[in-house]
Image: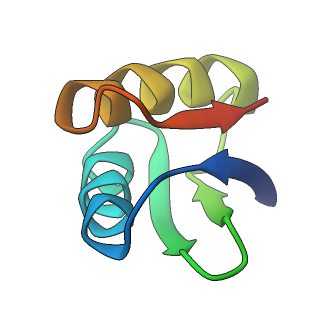
Amino acid sequence: MKKSYKIDVDCANCANKMEAAAQKTEGVKNASVNFMMLKMNVEFEDGADPRAVMENVRKNCRRVEADCEVYL
């Protein structure tokens, strides 16, 4: 399953950090961040609960960029 989420981030470097953090999150098969569109596209692993996975993605992103936001 693939879903798109609105994000709030200040710079392209921060967006890259968010993408890397999201990709390392359990339950995420693939993630990409488009800084210009302020969007995060996430492909979930089979059987993963998107809501629970995205809560962990949000936490992991905030560890690398404290003032970012992922709107669920």
Way the structure is coloured: rainbow
Look at the picture and state if 46 lies above or below 60: below
Q: Residue furthest left?
A: 64
Q: Position of residue 60 (x, y in %)?
A: 31, 29
Q: Position of residue 20 (x, y in %)?
A: 25, 60
- Give me the residue at 60% from left, 30% from top: 54
* Residue 35 appears in the figure: yes
Residue closest to the eye, 10 or 47: 10
Give the quadrant of the C terminus: top right
* Quadrant of the rendered image containing residue 70: top right
Q: Identify whether 12 is placed above or below 58.
A: below
Which residue is pictured at 63% across the width and 82% down the height? Answer: 36
Q: Toward which corner of the image does residue 14 lie, by quadrant? A: bottom left
Is residue 6 shown left or right of residue 23?
right
Q: On the picture, is 31 further left or further right than 50?
A: left
The correct choice, above or below, for 37 with respect to 7 in the image is below
Asked whether 32 or 45 is in front, the reply is 32
Left-right relation of 25 to 1? left
Whether residue 17 sits left or right of residue 46 in the image: it is left
For image coordinates 57% across by 33% down, the residue present is: 69
Residue 59: give x, y in percent of width and height: 39, 19
- The residue most toward the front is 10
Residue name at image x 27 percent, y 37 percent = 65
From the viewer's perspective, is residue 6 above or below residue 61?
Answer: below
- For the image shown, how many numbered marks are present on the structure? 0
Quarter of the picture holding the N terminus: bottom right
Residue 26 spot, x, y in % from top left: 35, 35
